Image (spheres, rainbow, N blue to C red):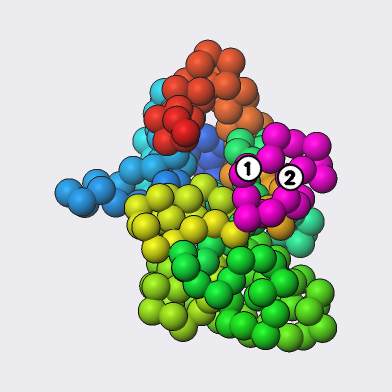
Amino acid sequence: SSGGETTEEPTATATEDSVVPDNVVIGSDIPYRPFEYETTSGELTGFDVDIAQAIFEEQLGVSYEFKPTSFDSIIPSLNNNNFRIIMSAMTINDTRAEKVDFSDPYFTAYQTVIVRANGDISSKEDLKGQPVGVQKGTTGSTAAEELKTEFDGDLTLKQYDQINGAFQALINGQVVAVINDNTVNAEFANQRDDVVFLEGEGAAAEAGQEAPPYLTLTVENYGIAFRQDDDEFREKVNEALAAIKEDGTYDEIYSEYFSG
Ligand code: ARG
């Protein structure tokens, strides 16, 4: 260095995230239909994808891309800067809130149980002593652990990296049930004659909510997850989410996937 005076403007440090990036990279476990999945022609679609489109492209004027990531390691992966946020039908809960910050809730879901039609399982009690399939790292897995405790340990949990592994195991007879989010279970069960929901009341009715017509083990809300130092961006996203709820865009997207 010459030691002389410098007239250069200070430049922004490359490591610092801008409040709203030009391109929002989104970590997500795919497929999780109808939230994030590919059409037969290979196009990424789903409720989360359309909400991302509305928030980022339409409201904030930036682009976005989904980065496929294993759900079980998605929070550490966010905190290792592999992407900016998580949109993955992710349930807001206290354990996760120790490691990430969530947006305002954007979807209500329930843990539910699907079984083979004409099988031996017709009530929650029938699950005792049986193998049950879940996706690793999910609230479905937590709900299954709780059921296991309720059965004094007499339940076998089979953990799959992706939900389709659990669905396949149900068809193959390797598990007698899959515990998973209601709308995702519905998407699978509605495609097939040989899979049905386990009936009964439960958490939704207890919470005074209009209950789905089948057994609910929990009531949950989805949120977009951010790193804990990303408050300004999180605020912008919350504002955009409020705007699309206000102007009808959210309802339009909702009815596209959940018309009933
Ligand atoms: N809602 C559940 C949870 O937060 C399941 C989410 C799984 N998402 C996915 N894209 N595979 O644990």
Q: Main SS type for the magenta part?
A: loop
SS category of the residue bearing label 2: helix
Relative to 125, residue 5 above or below:
above
Is residue 203 rendered magenta in the image? Answer: yes
Q: What residue do we see at 64% from left, 70% from top?
A: 141
Asked whether the beta carbons under mark 1 and mark 2 sit within 8 Å of each other, the answer is: yes
Is 221 left or right of 85, judged from the image as shown?
Answer: right
Relative to 120, residue 3 above or below:
above
SS category of the residue bearing label 1: loop
Start-end of magenta stretch: 199-215
Looking at the rendered structure, which numbered label has been put on residue 204?
A: 2
Query: Residue 197, image x and y in percent?
Result: 54, 57
| Residue picked out by circle 1 | 212
User: Who is closer to the viewer here, 90 or 59?
Assistant: 90
Query: Residue 169, image x and y in percent?
Result: 43, 77
Q: Which of marks 1 and 2 is nearer the N terminus?
A: 2
User: Who is closer to the viewer here, 188 or 70?
Assistant: 188
* Label 1 within 8 A of ligand 1 by Cβ: no
| Dot 2 alpha-carbon crowd within 10 angstroms: few under 14, some 14 to 19, many 20 or more | many
Q: Which residue lies furthest to the top in this view?
A: 247
Query: Residue 187, image x and y in percent?
Result: 42, 50
The residues bearing labels 1 and 2 have C-alpha atoms spaced at a distance of 7 Å
* Label 2 within 8 A of ligand 1 by Cβ: no
Would you say residue 129 is visible in this rendering?
Answer: yes
Type of the residue with mark 1:
Pro
User: Who is closer to the viewer here, 140 or 65?
Assistant: 140
Type of the residue with mark 2:
Ala
